[in-house]
Image (cartoon, helix red, strand yellow):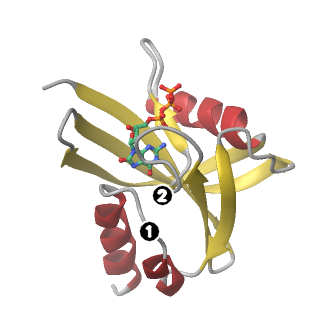
Amino acid sequence: MKTIEVVAAIIKHDDKILTTRRSYGEFENMWEFPGGKVEAGETQEKALIREIKEELELDIDITNYLTTVDYDYPNFHLTMHCFICTICGGKMHLNAHNDAKWSTLEELDELNWVPADVLVIEKLKSDNNQ
Ligand SMILES: Nc1nc2c([nH]c(=O)n2[C@H]2C[C@H](O)[C@@H](COP(=O)(O)OP(=O)(O)OP(=O)(O)O)O2)c(=O)[nH]1
């Protein structure tokens, strides 16, 4: 099975986290963390900065590494590296999503997530309880 390597941004502001809703493809209208595929020759950090600029027109600072999740979808294996980030510039514009919202950790449970992201949310919650 092919593996897709993806980077995702957990963008924080105060006690809120930015979530975005996919506007196309097999996970249309499900919530995710913004990001995308790492291109050949790119570092994970460079890929994430590029993806967030493309998708949201935002500049980000990567604060720290959160986790890497591995998930088997029926037609591919996902390896997704997740980083905690903050916004350092730009004005949000949705180029690849049909909605975005700021949610507290508790409010994340109310959203219909892309399947692999449930693992990311578990990690965010366990870190928060330490
Ligand atoms: N961006 C993102 N992708 C995720 C998440 N969770 C998850 O399972 N995925 C999957 C969905 C997609 O199959 C894959 C990422 O693809 P993508 O479509 O965002 O990548 P990309 O921006 O490089 O897009 P494309 O030009 O190939 O469409 O990872 C997540 O939180 N964020």
How far apart in space, not on screen, are marks 1 and 2 (Cα)? 6 Å
Along the line of sight, which residue is nearer the eye, 73 or 91? 73
Where on the image, by quarter, is ligand 1?
Answer: top left
Residue 54: image quadrant is: top right
Label 2: which secondary element? loop
Q: How many marks?
A: 2
Answer above or below: position of 5 versus 128.
above
Q: Position of residue 93 (x, y in %)?
A: 81, 46
Q: Earlier in the sequence, mark 1 or mark 2?
A: 2
* Residue at image location 64% in from the left, 47% down from the top: 97
Amino acid type, callout 2:
Met
Answer above or below: position of 29 versus 38.
below
* Residue at image location 46% in from the left, 18% down from the top: 39
Quarter of the picture containing the N terminus is top left
* Residue at image location 78% in from the left, 40% down from the top: 57
Instruction: Describe residue 97's horizontal placement relative to residue 9 as left or right.
Output: right
Disc 1 to disc 2: CB gap under 8 Å:
yes
Residue 7: image quadrant is: top left
Instruction: Describe residue 60's horizontal placement relative to residue 63 as left or right.
Output: right
The residue labelled by disc 1 is: 112
Answer above or below: position of 56 versus 105.
above
Determine whether the beta carbon of the residue marked 2 sits less than 8 angstroms from the nearest atom of ligand 1: no
Along the line of sight, which residue is nearer the eye, 23 or 2? 23
Label 1: which secondary element? loop
The residue labelled by disc 2 is: 30
Q: Position of residue 92 (x, y in %)?
A: 81, 50
Determine whether the beta carbon of the residue marked 1 sits less than 8 angstroms from the nearest atom of ligand 1: no
Instruction: Describe residue 3's horizontal placement relative to residue 7 as left or right.
Output: left
Answer above or below: position of 93 versus 10.
above
